[in-house]
C-alpha cells in the first residue's frame, strides 16, 4: 500500500479500508448484488476521500466539516455492510465492520479534539 501522505494513521487506515471495500464490492458484483455493491463502493470510498480532502482544509472549521462528512459516509457504509451481513455475506462483512468501527472511533475523536481546539482559541 503506497500512500502519498506519510505517517498519517487515519489516512492510511481509510485507504486500506477503501481497497478492502472495493474487493468486497467485486464479490457482490459477481453475485449480481449490484445495488449493494454500488452503494457500498460510493460510501465506503467516500470516507477516505473526505479525510484526504480535510488534509488541505482552509480552516479548522473546514477540517471539521470534512471529517463530519466522512463520519456520515461511515454511518452509511455501516448500514450497507450490516445489510450484506444479514443477507448472506457475514464472513466478508464482519471484518469490514470491525475495521470501520475503529475508523469511526478515530474520526469521532479527531472531530472532538479539533472542536475543543477551536473553542479554547476563542476563550
Image (cartoon, helix red, strand yellow):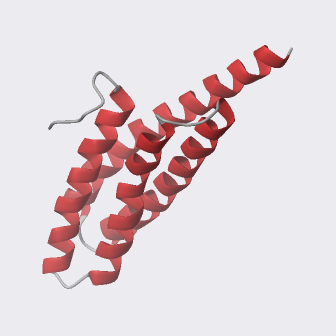
- Residue 119's spot in the image, x, y percent? 78, 21
Q: Is residue 38 above or below residue 95?
A: below
> In front: 78, or 26?
26
**Quadrant for the N terminus in the image:** top left
Number of residue marks:
0
Residue in the image at 41% along x and 56% along y? 46
Name which quarter of the figure residue 91 lies in: bottom left
Q: Is residue 9 above or below residue 25?
A: above
Residue in the image at 34% along x and 25% along y? 8
- Residue 88's spot in the image, x, y percent? 25, 72
Residue in the image at 56% along x and 35% along y? 108
Name which quarter of the figure residue 4 lies in: top left
| In this picture, residue 91 sits left or right of residue 35 | left
Residue at the front extreme? 58
Q: Is residue 97 above or below residue 88?
A: above
Residue at the bottom extreme? 32
Amino acid at each position: 500500500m503506497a500512500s502519498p501522505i506519510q505517517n498519517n494513521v487515519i489516512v492510511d487506515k481509510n485507504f486500506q479500508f477503501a481497497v478492502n471495500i472495493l474487493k468486497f464490492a467485486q464479490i457482490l458484483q459477481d453475485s449480481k448484488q449490484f445495488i449493494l455493491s454500488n452503494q457500498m463502493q460510493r460510501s465506503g470510498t467516500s470516507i477516505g476521500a473526505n479525510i484526504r480532502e480535510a488534509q488541505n482544509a482552509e480552516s479548522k472549521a473546514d477540517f471539521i466539516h470534512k471529517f463530519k462528512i466522512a463520519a456520515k459516509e461511515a454511518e452509511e457504509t455501516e448500514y450497507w455492510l450490516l445489510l450484506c451481513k444479514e443477507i448472506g455475506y457475514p464472513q466478508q462483512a464482519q471484518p469490514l465492520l470491525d475495521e470501520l468501527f475503529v475508523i469511526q472511533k478515530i474520526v469521532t475523536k479527531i472531530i472532538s479534539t479539533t472542536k475543543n481546539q477551536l473553542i479554547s482559541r476563542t476563550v
